[in-house]
Image (spheres, rainbow, N blue to C red):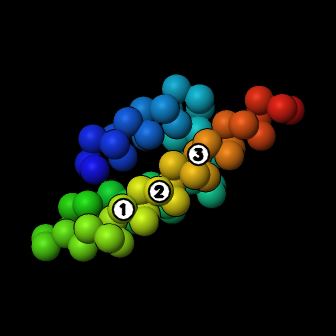
Amino acid sequence: MYKRQSGYQAKALGHGLSEHPQLTPLAERARTLLHTAPCELEQARAAVNAYQEMLTATIARDARS
């Protein structure tokens, strides 16, 4: 799941969204959960999914603009 999150962050960087005000807190939450031992997998998965969904929506919205 860590690699998945890293991939989404790279995607955000590629789209110029690495410091987006709505995405940054979601990315930080996912990263914190993934780096906390023991890792709460369900919470981490939900956080990564939330980040991915917001990233996808933001990219789609920007493409329409």
Does residue 28 appear in the picture of this structure? no
User: Between disc 1 and disc 3, whose residue precedes?
Assistant: 1
**Spatial distance from mark 2 to mark 1, Cα to Cα?**
6 Å
- In what element is the residue under mark 2? helix
User: Between disc 3 and disc 2, whose residue precedes?
Assistant: 2
Q: Nearer the observer, disc 1 or disc 3?
A: 1
**Residue at numbered disc 1:** 45
User: Is 38 positioned to the left or the right of 13 in the image?
Assistant: left
Q: Amino acid at mark 3?
A: Leu
Residue 28: x %, y % from top left? 41, 59
Neighbourhood count class around disc 3 (C-alpha, 10 Å): few under 14, some 14–19, many 20 upward:
many
User: Is 26 positioned to the left or the right of 63 in the image?
Assistant: left
- Give the quadrant of residue 56: top right
The one nearer the camera, 32 or 38, is 38
User: Is 40 positioned to the left or the right of 62 in the image?
Assistant: left
Residue 33: x %, y % from top left? 29, 67
Residue 65: x %, y % from top left? 86, 32
- Picture mark count: 3
As drawn, the label of residue 55 is 3
**Residue at numbered disc 2:** 49
- In what element is the residue under mark 1? helix
Query: Residues at badges 2 and 1 in contact (C-beta under 8 Å)?
Result: yes
Q: Residue at x 32, y 70 (%)?
A: 42
**Spatial distance from mark 1 to mark 3, Cα to Cα?**
15 Å
Q: Is residue 23 depicted above or below 3 in this figure?
A: below
Neighbourhood count class around disc 1 (C-alpha, 10 Å): few under 14, some 14–19, many 20 upward:
some
Q: Residue at x 61, y 52 (%)?
A: 54
Does residue 26 appear in the picture of this structure? yes
Q: Amino acid at mark 1?
A: Arg
As drawn, the label of residue 5 is none
- In what element is the residue under mark 3? helix
Q: Is residue 27 depicted above or below 29 in this figure?
A: above
